[in-house]
Image: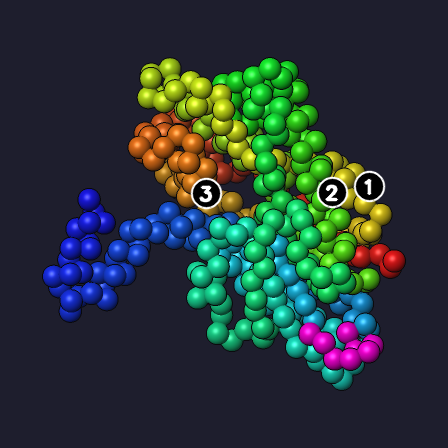
């Protein structure tokens, strides 16, 4: 109704068309706008915390000799899982400026920089390119496709970066969706609180995906190239009554869906066939997966406590962020007509919980990993 009214006003009030077009854009893209604003606040805290570590590792570990060894070529950087770029641009500035300092310290020549922005084919690259800072010091290009696969020519990349994207698995494990499997996740939407078989199915899928990611990047990176990973994670796998993590919030969404199924607002089979394709590793598990790869050395691995997470200090703020982040998945499966009811219930459950309402109880972590491509 609102959208139709705005379109009608555009036709009858041409003088106000610019303003009405803006209102229409905001109305149609309100979830994307909210997601970008809240995601920027959360992830910018991660980038700021990682900045001095990235700068130090580039200054001491990056091998730049190959760039001018035969002929002048651009120094290529790729951001895998860039989304619409709002969190990518500050990181790209940090990386390019740090690499420039490295070149100045070792050679009189500064190469051109090319940044490749990667995400899935359905990503909003138009918004990304409209938002690129005008004073950027690099040439930009998009590379669409799954980062679990090889996307670039062999040894064509000098620096790889991936922030807050490796918690998304390539697909929900098939066993979790199979009602004949011991890992069938009936009545739940995530592995949190589920039987061990469900957790193991997720864990195996994650290990395979990270292995594929590392294998693809090993083909694309030059010898001596660096890769920075900022990986959303949990401090442990055990359930706690004194703190919560993102997994706990997904479990809470699941309980709201179960409640709605009991009241006949959605079908029970709809709940049984939906699972979030998200996995939150722990430091020990991630380190073991990386060490199984023979292509990279771990130069540095640290835990970052993201100060940005404390920006969500109310039930409405937490619900708004989760809705902006996950509504697309939920809407595709359950339909748009139940979204308001679902998130109203979620907000009320958050507000009624002293645990969830205190952001100091949120113990999700970010694992920062600096990897170096070994010589072949």
Residue 374 part of the magenta-drawn span: no
Asked which secondary structure carries label 2, the reply is: helix
Image check: 189 left or right of 286? left
User: Can you tell which mark lies on residue 211?
Assistant: 2
Question: For the view shown, which residue lies furthest in the bottom direction?
Answer: 108
Q: Nearer the viewer, mark 3 or mark 2?
A: 2
Vertical side of 256 occupied by 80: above or below: below
- Percent from the top left, x then y, of residue 128? 48, 61
**What is the distance, in whole Å, between disc 3 and disc 1 at their CAs?**
32 Å
**What is the distance, in whole Å, between disc 3 and disc 2 at their CAs?**
26 Å
Vertical side of 278 occupied by 376: above or below: below
The residues colored magenta run: 67-74
Vertical side of 12 occupied by 200: above or below: above
**Mark 3 lies on residue:** 325
Q: Looking at the figure, which quarter contains the C terminus?
A: bottom right
Image check: 169 left or right of 356? right
The dominant secondary structure in magenta is: loop
**Mark 1 lies on residue:** 292
Evaluate if marks 1 and 2 touch, with contact meaning CB atoms under 8 Å apart.
Answer: yes
Vertical side of 315 occupied by 196: above or below: above
**What is the distance, in whole Å, between disc 1 and disc 2 at their CAs?**
8 Å
Give 357 or 376, whichever is nearer the viewer: 376
- Disc with the residue nearer the chain's start (3 vs 1): 1
Residue 73 part of the magenta-drawn span: yes
């Amino acid at each position: 109704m609102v959208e139709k009214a705005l379109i009608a006003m555009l036709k009858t009030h041409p003088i106000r068309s610019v303003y009405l077009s803006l209102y229409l854009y905001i109305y149609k893209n309100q979830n994307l706008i909210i997601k970008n604003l809240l995601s920027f606040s959360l992830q910018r805290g991660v980038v700021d915390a990682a900045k001095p570590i990235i700068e130090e590792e580039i200054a001491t570990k990056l091998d730049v000799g190959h760039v001018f060894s035969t002929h002048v070529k651009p120094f290529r950087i790729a951001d895998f899982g860039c989304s619409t770029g709002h969190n990518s641009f500050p990181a790209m500035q940090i990386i390019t400026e740090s690499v420039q300092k490295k070149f100045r310290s070792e050679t009189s020549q500064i190469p051109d920089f090319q940044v490749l922005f990667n995400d899935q084919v359905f990503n909003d690259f138009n918004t990304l390119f409209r938002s690129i800072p005008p004073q950027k010091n690099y040439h930009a290009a998009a590379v669409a496709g799954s980062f679990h696969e090889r996307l670039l020519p062999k040894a064509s990349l000098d620096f790889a970066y991936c922030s807050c994207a490796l918690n998304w698995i390539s697909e929900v494990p098939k066993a979790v969706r199979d009602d004949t499997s011991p890992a069938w996740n009936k009545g739940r939407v995530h592995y949190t609180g589920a039987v061990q078989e469900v957790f193991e199915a997720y864990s195996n899928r994650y290990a395979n995906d990270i292995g594929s990611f590392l294998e693809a990047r090993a083909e694309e990176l030059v010898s001596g190239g660096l890769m920075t990973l900022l990986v959303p994670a949990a401090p442990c796998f055990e359930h706690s009554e004194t703190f919560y993590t993102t997994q706990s919030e997904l479990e809470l969404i699941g309980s709201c869906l179960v409640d709605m199924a009991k009241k006949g607002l959605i079908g029970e089979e709809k709940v049984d066939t939906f699972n979030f394709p998200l996995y939150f590793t722990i430091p020990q598990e991630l380190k073991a997966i990386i060490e199984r790869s023979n292509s990279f050395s771990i130069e540095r691995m640290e835990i970052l406590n993201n100060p940005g997470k404390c920006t969500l200090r109310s039930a409405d703020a937490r619900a708004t962020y989760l809705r902006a982040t996950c509504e697309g998945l939920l809407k595709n499966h359950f339909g748009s007509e139940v979204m308001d009811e679902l998130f109203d219930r979620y907000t009320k459950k958050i507000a009624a919980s002293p645990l969830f309402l205190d952001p100091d109880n949120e113990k999700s972590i970010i694992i920062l990993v600096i990897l170096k491509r070994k010589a072949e």
